[in-house]
Amino acid sequence: MYYGADYYPEHWPEERWAQDARLMREAGFNVVRMAEFAWTRMEPREGEFHFAWLDRAIALLAEHGIQTVLGTPTAAPPAWIMEAYPEASFVTEDGRPMTYGSRRNYCPTSDVYRAHSQRIVRSMAEHYAGNPNVIAWQIDNEFGGRCYCESCRRAFQHWLRQRYGSLDALNAAWGTEFWSHIYTAWEQIPLPWAAARLHNPSLALNYRRFVSDAYADYQRLQIQVLREAAPGQPITHNLMGFGYPILNYFDLAKDLDFVTWDNYPRFRGTPNLANRGLAHDTMRGLKNKPFWVMEEQGGPTGNAIVNATPRPGEIPFWAWQAVARGADGIVYFRWRTARFGAEEYWHGILDHHGIPGRRYHEVKAMGATLQRIGERLQGSRVAGDVAMLLSYDSRFALQNQPHNDHLDYPTVFQGLYRALWERNLGVQVVPPEADLSDFRLVIAPLLYILDEDLARRLSDYVAGGGTLVVTCRSGVMDVDNVIVDRKLPGLLADLCGVTVEEYDSLEDGRTVALQGEGAWAGAEGAGTAWADVLALQGAEALARYAADYYKGEPAITAHRHGEGLAIYLGTLPDAATAGQLVAWLSDTLGLQSPIAAPAGVEVTERVSEQGRFLFLLNGTADAQSVDLGAGGLELISGETVAGAMTLPPLGVRIVQR
């Protein structure tokens, strides 16, 4: 297990470094991340490299048992590059170049910026290749942002030529007859700049795909240099969890050795532990293997606005939640709060004065525990019988045509996940191309973009005995974001045993009452955001609408297909109805938590050859009791436990069984 902090020695007098290293060692740290924003310090002028200061920092930390992850510094380009090459600047949707002065102000397709990036990455890699104290590399920092510059326009046109082969094929796929938008030259195709009216949905979706591919390609450029110049050193990138909407993280993760991400639970609001759980499960699912948190919240966040301070116990609780869901590394952001710059109110473990306080001692206590038990957890993995299918194509398409203010892809996904999280069911977040055969339940929210291959594999999954849940607004579009010419849910109609006769957008925030029947007899609930009016084509109703002009029509259905079952949600269930759905599915399929627990107690399991590690996390403000049954060895206290166990507020227990 790796445990540490993001460290910026260039921000502090060198005579302070030894004190920092000592305090880190005493906190149980064995790793830091460094240098991801230090390009100008390393290369003050083109081709003139200064690594001696970083060499000294790496060596000093190593003397205290602390190894280093080095960041390539391309997220914050030097002023001398951007002054000389203004064409490398990121351009916003309204066509304005981003003013130098922040970060992520470069274009990922810019040839000149890519050349500068290759040079600094190669120089770092050659200098630190084989250094035993450099254990991994982080590419850039938090990729993201859609650029609308001239370089991106040319690159997008080339990308489209590669995808479609001919203008005739593109025009036919996009339906450019509409508004006479037929393209007769590749150079005519624009980016979807800010405009008075909606862009062609096919153009808008493909631009979003292109941007995601452009960052993956820019990352690949750096990875290739590192593989050549520093072979054997693992490579990662710090992503931003489930909530980040701009990049296809499955694609970005393919070239990485392991995934890391940045976790700030108390950023702009009260922590939502279910959403944190989803973020961890998503990051773990990108490569179906353990991950790191490369920036774990270590203090109050804020730039111009200062957010709430983590309450006593929250910082280690959030870190333990990450470990419980598959993290093999926790790296806090940051070690010491900066005294200058744009993030001087984005606090770290130490405040501006550098004197250890409450947050440091909480981190130190967790570090002592990890030093004792970390080896036991190494190699263990989180198990789960439920898959949630995350479609970035559908997510991107609905960004351009969101339907209404209450139909939002991440919100719908999070709502269904929360119902699973509340029952402590193990969830794997998977891409559309994933093998689903090992899962007993698959939930595919808002599968708006659907191709024939995925439709066939979903049908085969259900026919083979699986249970599938799909929602309204599924099977609506083909891969080019053109509406299908058949009754919805399109390619899923036969599988689900229903057709959509018409639909109602609940755009004003109203809900529609639901009344259960059959297996759901007596249940009541409500649908939100959308209402499909369904005709049964072999399915049976589980719930019908109890209001509006479609009162009495099916709203939620079940269809036996082969050996399995396909559930169709004609409306998006509110929290209570989602809970009823998951409870019924759990009873029907025999899905259950590793142990029974009261509301607010999160239960997960990591499994390895050494045994099963049961994590119990009390996210409530009150003490909670759980029954362990036969129990086992509780790793934090070192005591053998069985039967009833009390968890204090924000208490964490790990039982090896």
Image (cartoon, grey):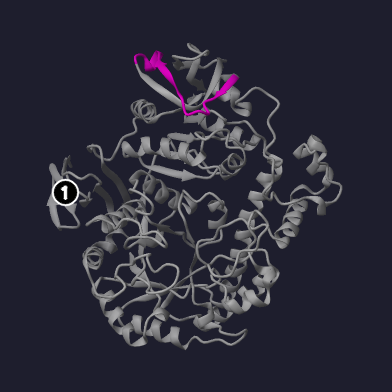
For the residue pair 68 and 295, the one nearer the viewer reads as: 295
Tell which residue pokes out farthest to the top in this image.
Answer: 552
Q: Check if residue 85 falls in the magenta segment.
A: no
**Residue occupying image coordinates x 85% and y 51%:** 185
For the residue pair 212 and 197, the one nearer the viewer reads as: 197
**Residue occupying image coordinates x 64% and y 36%:** 451
Q: Position of residue 490 (x, y in %)?
A: 63, 27
Q: Quadrant of residue 375?
A: bottom left
Instruction: Judge whether 355 appears above or below 553 on screen.
Output: below
Q: Position of residue 572 (x, y in %)?
A: 47, 28
Residue 88 seen in render: yes
Q: Secondary structure at mark 1?
A: loop
Q: Amino acid at mark 1?
A: Pro
Of the 4 image quadrants, the one containing the N terminus is: bottom left
Point out the stretch of residues depicted in magenta.
502-522
Q: Position of residue 366 (x, y in %)?
A: 24, 63
**Residue occupying image coordinates x 60% and y 37%:** 454
For the residue pair 580 and 407, the one nearer the viewer reads as: 407
Q: Give the mark count.
A: 1
**Residue occupying image coordinates x 50% and y 28%:** 508
Give the side of residue 156 with respect to residue 523, left or right: right
Q: Position of residue 613 (x, y in %)?
A: 27, 51
Q: Check if residue 513 falls in the magenta segment.
A: yes
Q: Residues within 10 Å of mark 1 (few under 14, many from 20)?
A: some
Residue 438 seen in render: no
Q: Quadrant of residue 14?
A: bottom left
Give the side of residue 104 with respect to residue 651, left or right: right
Instruction: Find disc 1 in the rendering and name its residue.
Output: 648
Instruction: Judge whether 548 appears above or below 265 on screen.
Output: above
Instruction: Judge whether 377 appears above or below 85 on screen.
Output: above
Instruction: Judge whether 222 appears above or below 440 on screen.
Output: below
